[in-house]
Amino acid sequence: MSSVKYTREHEWVKVEENIATIGITDFAVQELGDLVYVELPAPGEKIRAGERLAAVESVKAASDVFAPVSGEVVEANEALEDEAGLLNESPMGEGWIARLEMSDPSELDALMDRAQYDEFVKEAGH
């Protein structure tokens, strides 16, 4: 079983114990183009699933990143402040956005696995 889940807003979440690492998918990065700025959440901030977690700006558009799960921000990827391009290079690796300590792990049940996400993107005509 994969520990990575996906949202309809093109975020991914990888869970290790009770810590959820969150970022945006390869698809989202391709749609946005070259990313030039990332607005990160502050550690200690409490965020509910579906709320704005961060914002990304590309040469084409600005887009909010929504939290797939609720919790408290325990870490933000500060490397993105200096090098937003990490998101383009490695959206599911070095380009992660934030880590949350989850307050309700059952929220993961509402998210898609990779096969469901791939089907969602295909059906959306992308």
Image: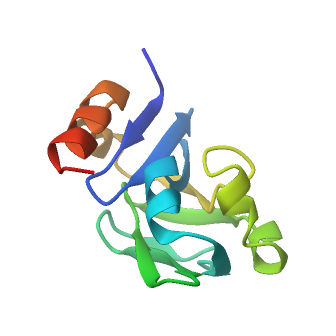
- Where residue 74 appears, as percent x and y from the top left, is 65, 62
Residue nearest the observer in this picture, 44 or 110: 110
x 65%, y 55%: residue: 96
> In the image shown, does 110 or 125 lie closer to the viewer?
125
Where residue 11 appears, as percent x and y from the top left, is 42, 55
Residue 1, relative to residue 89: is it above or below?
A: above
Q: Position of residue 57 (x, y in %)?
A: 56, 83
Q: Is residue 86 above or below residue 62?
A: above
Extreme-top residue of the structure:
1
- Is 37 placed left or right of 21 in the picture? right
Name above or below for residue 15 compared with residue 32.
above
Residue 118 sits in quarter: top left
| Looking at the image, residue 40 lies above or below residue 90 | below
Q: Residue at x 34, y 68 (%)?
A: 48
The residue drawn where x is 28% and y is 51% is 126
Q: In which quarter of the image is the N terminus?
A: top left
Left or right, residue 30 beside residue 37: left
Q: In this view, does 91 lie to the left or right of 104?
A: right
Please indicate, yes or no, whether residue 68 appears anywhere in the rendered image: yes
Judge whether residue 110 can be spotted in this image.
no
The reply, left or right, for residue 5 in relation to residue 96 is left
